[in-house]
Amino acid sequence: MKNRLINSLLFCSMLSILACQQANKATQDNQMDSDSTKSTAMEQIDKKSASPIIFERSKVQGEKDTLSFEVPRACAVHITLATETASSNIRINQLVKPDGQTDGPFGKTLTDSLTETGTYQLVIAESLMAENPYTGPYTLRIELK
């Protein structure tokens, strides 16, 4: 009876040790999966930033359009606003940074360095100093480099 009790205790101890080892291995595997997921997500962001962000909208006279885009890391940006007619009275009025600071007005193109990460906004509207406010379709192309 005494030997059975000792054998049972040894068996339970061995099972406990094996269970702890498997739990440690599972934790390590999860950490590795988490790290590879983070790296894959960053690679996707980097790949995504290589392709342009394109907004196709229709401008209503007298209204401002606010378009948002995410910047995952500091980078250079080139933004182009295109309409059917090159002389259309529409422009990039403001660039709103994640910290709330604004810059502008700009014309139909903007090249800048974006040093903050987060959500940037572009305000698209006509110039109040020019005649014939624009109404119609436009395309905004954002390239992060």
Image (tube, grey):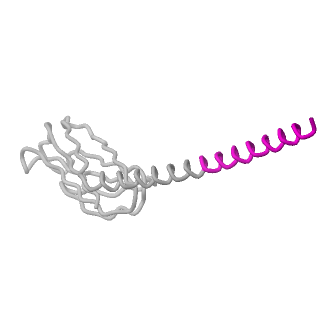
Magenta residues?
A: 1-27
Residue visible at 69% across and 46% down? 18
Which one is nearer the viewer's eye here, 121 or 11? 11
Residue visible at 83% across and 38% down? 8
Residue visible at 32% across and 64% down? 113
Which secondary structure is most common in the magenta stretch?
helix
Residue 64 occupies quadrant: top left
Q: Position of residue 139 (x, y in %)?
A: 17, 44
Quarter of the picture containing the C terminus is bottom left
Q: Position of residue 138 (x, y in %)?
A: 16, 42
Q: Position of residue 42 (x, y in %)?
A: 40, 54
Quarter of the picture containing the N terminus is top right
Residue visible at 12% across and 42% down? 132
Instruction: Judge from the rendering whether residue 25 lies leftward or rightward of residue 125; answer left or right.
Output: right
Relative height, residue 6 to residue 96 (above, below): above
| The magenta stretch spans residue 129 | no
Residue 16 occupies quadrant: top right
Relative height, residue 8 to residue 89 (above, below): above
Q: How many marks?
A: 0
- Farthest residue in the right direction? 2
Q: Position of residue 124 (x, y in %)?
A: 25, 46
